[in-house]
Image (cartoon, rainbow, N blue to C red):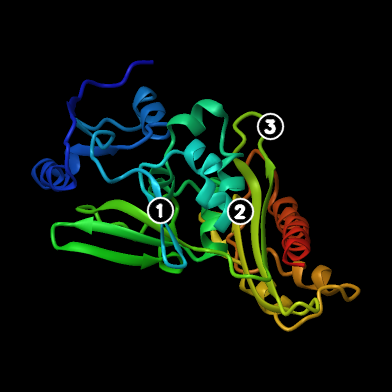
Amino acid sequence: MYPASFEYHSPTTVKDALGLMGKLGDDAKLLAGGHSLIPMMKLRLAQPKHLIDLRNVPGLKGVKEDGGTIVIGAMTTWYELETNAIVKAKCPIVSETASIVGDPAVRNLGTIGGGLAHADPAADMPATAIACNFEMVCEGPKGRRTVKVDEWFQGLMSTALKEDEILVEVRVPALAKGTGAAYLKFPHPASRFAIVGVAAVISTDGKGTCSKASIGVTGAGTKAVRAKGVEAGLSGKNLAGAGAIEAAAQKGAEGVDVQADLQGSVEYKAHLCRVFAKRAVEAAAKRAG
């Protein structure tokens, strides 16, 4: 199917892009990788009169270090994250998550900024974003502001990004010594979206006791959420002890607005939350040593 007609814009600065957004208002949509917007346009589910393509805006792509933080340009592709040496060394869970997004075509064009701004409830990176405590840098007419990940995902495909802002940068804390992380999912066999996905970041004291746990869940509900019950159940526990991880993982569906769909019932998806919480925590704890 063909999309409705639209006018194409290719700004070369963030300022120009923001100017177009202010001028065109609700008639315009930003284009990053296009793997979410273009299919919606072809199905006529979205019919913007103007597309503002961000591909030619310098400074929105690439990875660099800023002290103990990894700074990722919003237009950086999944493949670039998968293969980047800095990301693989400082926070490998981000590379690992990027490596299982969609298929090679998606990973070569899709971007981290587009994915996080679109906030598909079955996307992979939102779970890792929560577990790793990402910060999103947004730029608008009044300048830049930083949004913590716990304030970012607000509902079904809804984020804290304002209508007159562009997500320009993602800031990721490097993993500290004694910290392990893992993202595991039960994928849809065709789309590779997460029916349920869980990311875990676990810090230990070197003797097997969990000093800090950060857990993100995606796929099961209307948005990615923090599994606070699992985090609380792990904190202070010796993870080598019999049943410690199992007991905490039983809270994997707590606080998740689990939704039944063609992939499973509420009970089945809640079960997957518990199963993959256990597997992700076990993998992260093993990496933490």
State the residue in front, 253 or 243: 243
**Which of 133/7 is in front?**
133
Picture quarter with the C terminus: bottom right
Q: Tag 3 or tag 1, which sits nearer the N-term?
A: 1
- Toward which corner of the image does residue 193 lie, by quadrant? top right
State whether residue 166 is above or below residue 66. above
Q: Quadrant of residue 253?
A: bottom right
Q: Are marks 1 and 3 in contact (CB under 8 Å)?
A: no
| Residue bearing the label numbered 2 | 93
Q: Residue at x 70, y 52 (%)?
A: 269
How busy is the neighbourhood of tag 1: few (under 14 within 10 Å), some, or many (20 plus)? some
Residue visible at 62% across and 46% down in the picture: 96
Marks 3 and 2 sit apart, C-alpha to C-alpha, by 22 Å
Query: In the image, which is nearer the foreground, mark 3 or mark 2?
Result: 2
- x, y percentage for residue 133? 50, 66
The residue at which mark 3 appears reads as: 189
- Three-letter amino acid code at the position of disc 3: Pro
Query: Is disc 2 surrounded by few (<14), some (14 to 19) or many (20+) residues within 10 Å?
Result: many
Mark 1 or 2: the one toward you: 1
Between tags 1 and 3, which lies in front?
1
Q: Secondary structure at mark 3?
A: loop
Residue 158, image x, y percentages: 39, 54
Helix, strand or loop under label 1: strand
Disc 1/disc 3 C-alpha distance (Å): 35 Å
**Residue plotted at (62% across, 35% down):** 192
- At horizontal 30% and vertical 51% (from top left) the residue drawn is 168
